[in-house]
Amino acid sequence: MMRGHRAVNVLRDSRLLSQHHSARYLSLAARAPSGSLRPAPLIAAPIQINGRRYFSLTKPRHAAAGAAAAAAFKAAETAATLSPEDVAAKMSPEERKRLSRVRNIGIAAHIDSGKTTVTERVLFYTGRINAIHEVRGKDGVGSKMDSMDLEREKGITIQSAATFADWKKTEDGQEQTYHVNLIDTPGHIDFTIEVERALRVLDGAVMILCAVSGVQSQTITVDRQMKRYNVPRISFVNKMDRMGANPWKAVEQINTKLKIPAAAIQIPIGVEDQFKGVVDLVEMKAHYNEGPRGINMRVENEIPAELKELAEEKRQILIEKLADVDDEMAEIFLDEQIPTPEQIKGAIRRATIALKFSPVMMGSALADKAIQPMLDAVCDYLPNPGDVTNLALNKAKAEEETQLVPYNSLPFVGLAFKLEENNYGQLTYIRVYQGTLRRGTYLFNSRTDKKVRIPRIVRMHSNEMEDVDEVGAGEICAVFGVDCASGDTFTDGNLPYTMSSMFVPDAVMSLSIKPKKSTDADNFSKAMNRFQREDPTFRLSIDEESEETIISGMGELHLEIYVERLRREYRVECTTGKPRVAYRETISQRADFDYLFKRQSGGPGDFAKVVGWIEPNPEHREQNVFSNQVVGGVIPDKFISAVSKGFDLICEKGPLLGHKVIGVKMALTDGATHVTDSSDHAFSLAAQMAFRKTFPDAGGQVLEPLMKTTIMAPNEYQGQVLMLMSKRNATIIDTEIGPEEFTLIADCSLNAMFGFSSNLRAATQGKGEFSMEFSHYAAAPPHLQKELVAEYEKELEAKRTK
């Protein structure tokens, strides 16, 4: 009886006895003399109280230890209810200063705008590297951030690379050190997930534009991603030393094409090959780079005489733009006062962080000019982790949004945003949103409900690592030995929080792949598992009918890179099939169905009758809708849900090509059942067969993906490029002719674009380049539809006769 009471008390106390120790603790309690301290039971982690999980790394021996644990729980409760304003008020001056000096930034832009070249200069001027190496340099070393051999060979960035640096900046006559975490991202649309996950965890960004081309296709994609995650940005017009450089065209296009109020905060001193430096419109001072690699900045109070009028005009435009987006500047402007440099800086910072404005700077990374003022602007105008609102979802309160505060003393919350495999195992990049991450501590994965230990914490410098013991709130680091997926949220167990994951676009292209040697199957499998964990846009599937392994991705280059990585990193030679396009199927008109499915096979048979219609779904062209319009209980509810499931199944594998069906509405109005022979299975099959039979009457057709294709080439090749596109039945949307190059934007079928890169190189003598991104689905030409259907039927027939 006494034992029963004790067990009940333990359960009421929300404490759990581990089997291994329970006997020892209970027997000690039985022998304890009166008046001595009462031993407390061992707490097995995790304990769940009010939706929160707590971990204890020690074994509390006495009731006093239990009181300490209760106090810890109370502190966690209090921390969870603190508002950001309360935390800010309690924050120590040291913590506030540390936070104000942290910047988490990304560098993003169109292909070949100079992102990696800018990053290389940033690392050099901050003292992180001792020498500059170019992306396609003659010394063959390659830039620091392009660490993969493939990146150095092709001269492109494939994976986003993280680094950190300290920038010393003079403020009010004193030198202040800013800690900058920086991620260099790829420009190709095929590697867009790298930009997506970098922007998900960054507080600010530098958007780089080419002074000749201005806003390009991938600039628009990057702008869309920045807006999706509310990332403030400063714009940097690079390549000011190139022939045809025009920064004012870029500023205008940011305003008109990207729809962001923007104004230059610098003007160039000379352009093209005469580019010498910049004039700062805020301080009205001239900045020149001197010394080897432009390492020294010379600042002069005197602006060149020929630029004074232009500087005054552009400064006035800057003030007017700021008056439109900032209330304080609007008051100064309406009072017809001249704002001080401090007031202009304050207005730029407020408007930039509020996503209302983008200051535009200019320079040339390759010529080592005006990079240091851009670093100063990162510190002056981009937010620190405390200026940005980061939200978590509270699972204990029906996923209510809760603001996270970057304060070291609060319970830990972090997000794993990128995974990488290297010689030491899986490397997980984590953004610390709240609390402190310490080596050797235990974290709780809110997706899997698993507790993991953090054995090693590193700061990344491209492919090099620097071990650290702890990382504070607002920082970015990487950890080893943590088995998780990209987008997992980690807490220390004190908060039931999870964070929203990033946007992952759908794959647009597939191809079949298999290793040439059967002995390479293990390595092939390892590589595929690793690539899928690292890259959410890379997908692997098995075709049930052909039993082929199918890889899917964002484009030709994307899949080509992975096939090449298989060969280099895993020594697996592969054969690939013809690229497959992700077609879709749909209908163009309404058609009625009245289908009876009846089958007798000795025992209980199958019986199901379904009546209704299918029609296009104009409201949501990419969604399928099932509508139940049965009245009077002719068909029981359980069979109606079976009809809905049958509709979903047939939409996964359409009647024409076996591809997904989209934009269809199915309405069920009537039917019939049999007392013994009707079943869920029978009604599911009846729905599928009715759909298959009615599909041709409803004008079933094949949809193909159209790609928004942007081609850039020298002006003399315009005729050849237009001829290439007309052969592919492309729809020309826009043509922009610059002083040297022209840009052509067209919608073209993905099927027609296979092998286009080699055709474009041949037509432009290797000087043309192009990029593609998915635009929308449209009906394929009738002749192509017939060919595809005939080919699919031939494949099915071949499989049947095997």
Image (cartoon, rainbow, N blue to C red):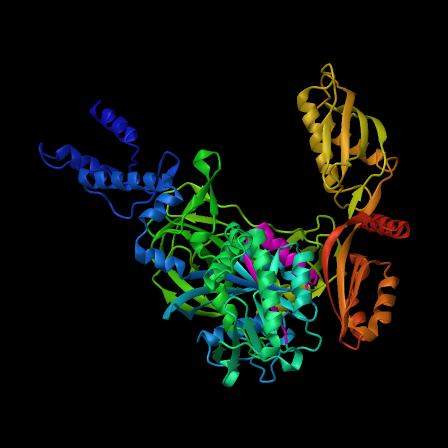
Residue furthest to the front: 336
Judging depth in this view, the residue of 759 and 679 nearest the camera is 759
Residue furthest to the top: 632
Residue 533 in sight here: no
Q: Quadrant of residue 142?
A: bottom right
Judging depth in this view, the residue of 18 and 294 nearest the camera is 294
Residue 444 locus on image (x, y percent): 40, 47
Location of the N terminus by quadrant is top left
Residue 276 locus on image (x, y percent): 58, 80
- Does residue 705 appear to the left or right of 303 in the view shown? right
Name the residue located 87 percent from the left edge and 67 percent from the top edge.
Answer: 723
Residue 1 in sight here: yes
Q: Is residue 235 magenta?
A: yes
Q: Which residues are drawn in magenta?
A: 214-240
Q: In which quarter of the image is residue 156?
A: bottom right
Residue 30 locus on image (x, y percent): 15, 32
Name the residue located 84 percent from the left edge and 58 percent from the top edge.
Answer: 730
